[in-house]
Each structure stands twice: as C-alpha cells, then as structure tokens.
Image (cartoon, rainbow, N blue to C red):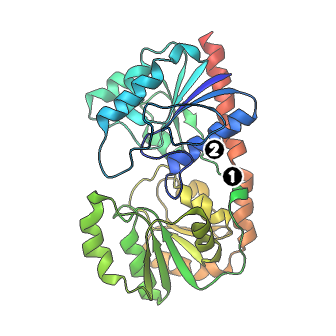
C-alpha cells in the first residue's frame, strides 16, 4: 500500500523526551515500512525515519505558542500530494479536516485528542469528511456523533522499556503539570502517606499559575522532588524502580500512554477511574482504578503487593505496537477496497 502519515509539527519524530502522539506516529510508520509498505511521512525535517520524509518545516516548531497558520500550511503541503496515495492517515486533528473533504483517497483521522466541540458549527460540517478512529472505547462513545469507525488502542514497543522487579519506596507522577492531570492530588497523597514523590513533567505557559500556587510551595527536593522533562533512559529508570505510578486524572483522558510505559517497566498504576483507565487497568492485577481520594490512598498502599510480571505481560499481550499496526493495516485495506 502507498500510505501517507501526517504528523504534528511541534516535535521531531521520534520525540526525545515528551510527545505521546509523536511516538505513536513514529512507531506506526516504522512498523509499516518494515512490513513492506511504501510510506511517506510528513513531519519536520529534523525527524528520523525509514519512510520517505517530506517536510514543510526544516525543524520542529516546539511548544509554547499556537501555530494555526503553520499547522494549516503543513496540512496543505501534505494533502497536495493526496492523489499519490492509496490511503492518508492524519494525526493533526482539526487541521486536516478541511483538506480531507476534497481528497480522493480515503482519509483516516486518529483522534489523539477530542478535536471538535459539539456546539461548534464545524462539528456538523466536518463530521463525515473522513474516517475517524478513537483511541479508546470511552472516547469512541463520547465522539459517537462523528463518523467513528471504532477504536484502536495505542501500542508501544515493549522492548524499549526496562523491566524492574526490585522496587524502591517512592511514588512517581509523569505528565503535564496541570490540574486535569492531577499533579496536586499526587502531592497530597504523598504527603498524607509520608512517601517520597518524583514529580516529572513540563509546565505549559497556560498552567504556570497552577504550578506556582498549587505545586511549587510543596517542592522541597527531599520528599516532593520536581524533575523537568527527562530523556528516555532516565524516564525508564524512574519507571522501573518506582513502587507505583500515580495517574489521578480529573478529566476524560482519551488514552494516557504513560500508563503503558509504566506497566511495561513492571510498575503498577494507581489511577482515578476516568477516560480510558478502566480499559487499561485491571484492578488487583496491574494496578487500581478508584473513585475517591481515600480509595486512592489505600490503593497506593496495596500496590506493593502486585506482581511486576503481570504488569508487563498485560502490555505485551494487549497493547503492543504490533497489535496496533495490525489493526490500522486492516482498516487501511478495508477503506481502500471500499473506495475502489
């Protein structure tokens, strides 16, 4: 198959230390190339790939600002080649939709984020311009008014993650330092249980006030230790040695890739039961999905009794990059056949 993969332009592929969507696009692209498909990746020029790389921007633009005009330019650059492909896979959310409407080959848009407000006129206009794919059952239900083909769970290359079964007595939080990710809840739990917490993540300008008021006062670098974004080896080490990963989200998160990364390292996840959490966490097996703060505290204590091997096995069996690629490959073939 001749396949186009259109990536976001904020980060190069594969991402160095942050970028869940970019990691999924990179992993999928490389697997498709290995399977013999003719893949063209539209990404920043500083990306590395075995596919044919086409770039509108020589370097990734980075975070910190909105780049709507550049995102549109990037989408236009990719879709002007539309007739060269059997299928186009867009990972750029809303920016690909205006061009999808007029593309001859079938277009797949993965909903890495919830991209359309149902109160917006654009929802009705764009809801059937392409085949939408959710990344979880939860998101699929919430986006049911779109032409959603179904859901395909994200997958990771488990071999890239170091397994550890000799745990240390610290808790771990990795993610954006924001209210909806629950960084403040993680801190409250660590203080209540008198446990050390590594708080790893990036601070977007939009969440700087939250960090200054709700997070920074508690950072003493003894019990509550703040670590800026780290590279893959450092992140692996933190995952592998932690007693458990805290995932106290306060929103319907479409997926949550860090749960898979933690489990692959043999580290259970204690999370609030929202979004995709119940699709990934099996209570008492690889973590706990809870409904209250008190349950959250108890689950953290109980996490030490879980077997790290069960955590890793769960990802190997259900959330591998190979399984994800299999499902996308089947979807591409189905859409191409229907288009003919």
Q: Is residue 241 above or below residue 206?
A: below
The answer to whether the residues at label 2 and label 1 have Cβ atoms under 8 Å apart is yes
Picture quarter containing residue 249? bottom left
Percent across and percent down for residue 237 are 62, 72
Distance from disc 2 to disc 1, alpha carbons, whole Å, reads 8 Å
Picture quarter containing residue 327? top right
Q: Is residue 248 above or below residue 64?
A: below
Q: Is residue 136 above or below residue 55?
A: below
Residue drawn at x 74%, y 36% as measured from the top left: 34
Residue drawn at x 72%, y 43% as measured from the top left: 322
SS state under label 1: loop
Describe residue 27's horizontal placement relative to residue 202 as left or right: right
Q: Quadrant of the C terminus?
A: top right
Please name the residue that numbered disc 2 is placed on: 27
Mark 2: give few (<14), some (14-19) or many (20+) Cα within 10 Å: many
SS state under label 2: helix
Q: Is residue 233 above or below residue 159?
A: below
First along the sequence among labels 2 and 1: 2
Percent across and percent down for residue 109 are 49, 31
Please name the residue that numbered disc 1 is placed on: 157
Q: Quadrant of the N terminus?
A: top right
Residue drawn at x 42%, y 53% as measured from the top left: 252
Residue drawn at x 66%, y 67% as measured from the top left: 286
> Foreground: 239 or 146?
239
């Amino acid at each position: 198959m001749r396949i186009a993969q259109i990536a976001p332009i904020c980060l190069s592929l594969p991402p160095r230390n942050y970028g869940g969507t970019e990691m999924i696009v990179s992993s999928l692209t490389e697997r498709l190339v290995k399977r013999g498909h003719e893949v063209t990746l539209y990404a920043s020029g500083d990306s590395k790939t075995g596919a044919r790389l086409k770039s509108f921007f020589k370097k990734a633009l980075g975070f910190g600002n909105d780049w709507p005009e550049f995102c549109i330019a990037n989408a236009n650059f990719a879709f002007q080649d539309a007739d060269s492909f059997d299928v186009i896979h867009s990972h750029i959310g809303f920016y690909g939709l205006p061009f999808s409407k007029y593309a001859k080959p079938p277009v797949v848009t993965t909903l890495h984020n919830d991209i359309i407000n149902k109160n917006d006129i654009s929802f009705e206009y764009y809801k059937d311009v392409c085949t939408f794919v959710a990344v979880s059952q939860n998101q699929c239900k919430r986006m049911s008014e779109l032409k959603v083909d179904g859901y395909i769970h994200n997958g990771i290359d488990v071999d890239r993650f170091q397994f550890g079964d000799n745990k240390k007595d610290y808790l771990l939080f990795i993610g954006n330092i924001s209210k909806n990710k629950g960084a403040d809840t993680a801190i409250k739990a660590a203080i209540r249980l008198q446990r050390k917490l590594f708080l790893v993540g990036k601070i977007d300008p939009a969440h700087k006030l939250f960090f200054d008021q709700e997070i920074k006062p508690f950072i003493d670098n003894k019990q509550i230790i703040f670590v800026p974004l780290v590279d893959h080896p450092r992140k692996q080490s933190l995952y592998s040695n932690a007693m458990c990963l805290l995932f106290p989200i306060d929103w319907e998160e479409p997926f949550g890739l860090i749960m898979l990364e933690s489990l692959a390292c043999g580290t259970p996840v204690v999370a609030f039961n929202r979004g995709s959490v119940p699709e990934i966490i099996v209570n008492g097996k690889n973590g706990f999905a809870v409904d209250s703060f008190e349950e959250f505290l108890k689950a953290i204590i109980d996490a030490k009794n879980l077997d790290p091997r069960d955590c890793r096995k769960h990802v190997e069996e259900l959330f591998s990059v190979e399984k994800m690629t299999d499902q996308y490959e089947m979807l591409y073939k189905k859409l191409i056949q229907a288009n003919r």
